[in-house]
Amino acid sequence: MSTHLPSFPRLAFVDLETTGGTLATDRITEVGIVEVDEDGVREWSSLVNPEMPIPAFIQNLTGISNEMVREAPTFGQLADEIHARLEGRVFIAHNARFDHGFLKQAFGLTGHTFRPSVLCTVRLSRKLYPQYERHNLDALVARHRLQVAERHRALGDAQLIWQFWQRIRDEHEPEALAEAVARLTKRPSLPPRLDPAVLERLPATHGVYLFYGANEYPLYIGKANNLRRRVLSHFSGDHASDRELTLCQQTERVEWVETAGELGALLQEALLVKERMPAQNKKLRHSEDLCAWRLLRKAGRLQPVLARPDGDLFFAHDSQLYGLFTSSRAATEALRSIAEAHQLCPVLLGLEKLRAGQAGRPCFASQIGKCSGACAGHEDPAAHDERVLAALESLRLKPWPYAGAIGIREGEATHVVDAWAYVGTGSNQDELARLVARGQQPFDRDVYQILQKWLPKLGPRISLLQA
């Protein structure tokens, strides 16, 4: 049976040993490669002088000592050969992000471009054997009865990955395996004017990302629990709509803001969308006609009056607000539907006016059985008021439940919120004091909706901040 796939005829099974797991500070100590193609199978390995001490626990784990690598070639001396062995091949490794990341950085320091198709056998094992919980290399050795030569040495572990490949070739139909590999090696289809190097710097953290086109105005702003994964998903090539395809084609620049967690990302997204007004965002944008119904008592009866948050300092604190609505028209239509559903009087609600001389007479809705007749004295006004309150109760806005601004701790950051408005995020007392000193900000519908879900579960992470 052929050991390669028609779509991927040249394979390289790779493993590295390093001085540790931190990409920024650790270095490669050994490279092992098993090359597989139409001409057969070839193995190659070399120790690498990391030009730094190997920690004792790493020496114990791998058996590679400082003495062993002292006279070994540096990566720079091996770079051309390693690059030639991997060029044009599918890069296959266990936990491939680790090995690929170390090699990519090392090649970058030697001036080599390294962008292979990458296949992670951890992810491949999970996809092909979802019934199993563990997919580390030791689990694969036990489960598939792989023959161990030198565990935790580069060539020995590369050989194990190669053996695993042969096992799955025996246990799965070629078409199913080819489909799984194609999905796992699928590379983003990047916009033509976007620098790929920018995406390499994307962190796998919570945050907000901004896509820009040809000018300084963002096309789109989104939030993510994993910035790297979310941004790359936009360029998957499998666009669900023309809008997504257009966004991908127009994007020339990507920026991002890291946040302490998911709540910070939600608050930052809502803030930035309102500030920057990106063309492709329909939600979270500022609505100048945002309004709610405020119940006021006039002439002894409750009557809804439209209230708007702009310039209304009491808006966030009023317990008699019902909404929210994006326009006065939407508010009126909603109130009219509620009146019809509950047989409330449209005249008493201010939705209709009686003509001169008709005071005390039934309104038109009453004449056709859609009003209980409070307008004509057939229902006690107090009873009508009670029914108005009951009908609107599901729309009641919650007033701000604190005496002032609060701080919400998330990781090392504290988000400042006051009267359903996000003020900002600080990391020390001076920053928090400056944020609180800004005073009450305009009511924000999106912050209100976000915090309705979050406040009940935040508990001790909330503290009242003094101005």
Image (cartoon, rainbow, N blue to C red):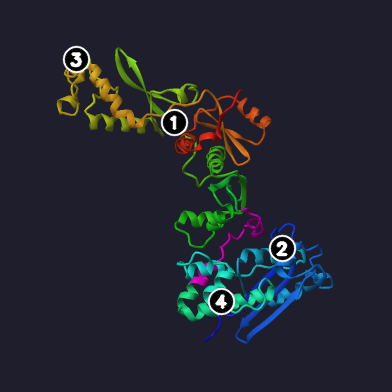
Q: CA distance from mark 2 to mark 1?
A: 52 Å
Name the residue tied to disc 3. Answer: 360
Q: CA distance from mark 1 to mark 4?
A: 62 Å
- The stretch drawn in magenta includes residue 443: no
Name the residue tied to disc 2. Answer: 105
- Of circles 4 and 2, which is in front? 4
Query: What range is drawn magenta here?
Result: 180-203
| Position of residue 86 in the picture relative to residue 405 (left or right) | right
Q: Residue 247's spot in the image, x, y percent?
A: 52, 54
- Of circles 3 and 4, which is in front? 4
277, 185: nearer the viewer: 185
Query: Tags 1 and 3 in contact by the CB under 8 Å rule?
Result: no
Category of crowding for the residue at label 3, using alpha-carbon neighbours closer than 10 angstroms: few (below 14), some (14–19), many (at least 20): few
The residue at the point 40 percent across, 29 percent down is: 397
Give the mark nearer the N terminus: 2 vs 3. Answer: 2
- The three-letter code of the residue at mark 3 reads Gly
| Position of residue 320 in the picture relative to residue 246 (left or right) | left
Name the residue tied to disc 4. Answer: 164
Name the residue tied to disc 1. Answer: 289
Instruction: Please identify the quarter of the rendering in which residue 248 is found.
Output: bottom right
Q: Residue 167's spot in the image, x, y percent?
A: 52, 79
Category of crowding for the residue at label 1, using alpha-carbon neighbours closer than 10 angstroms: few (below 14), some (14–19), many (at least 20): some
Q: Secondary structure at mark 2?
A: helix
Query: Tags 2 and 3 in contact by the CB under 8 Å rule?
Result: no
Category of crowding for the residue at label 2, using alpha-carbon neighbours closer than 10 angstroms: few (below 14), some (14–19), many (at least 20): some
Give the mark nearer the N terminus: 1 vs 4. Answer: 4
Instruction: Please identify the quarter of the rendering in which residue 95 is found.
Output: bottom right
Q: Secondary structure at mark 3?
A: loop
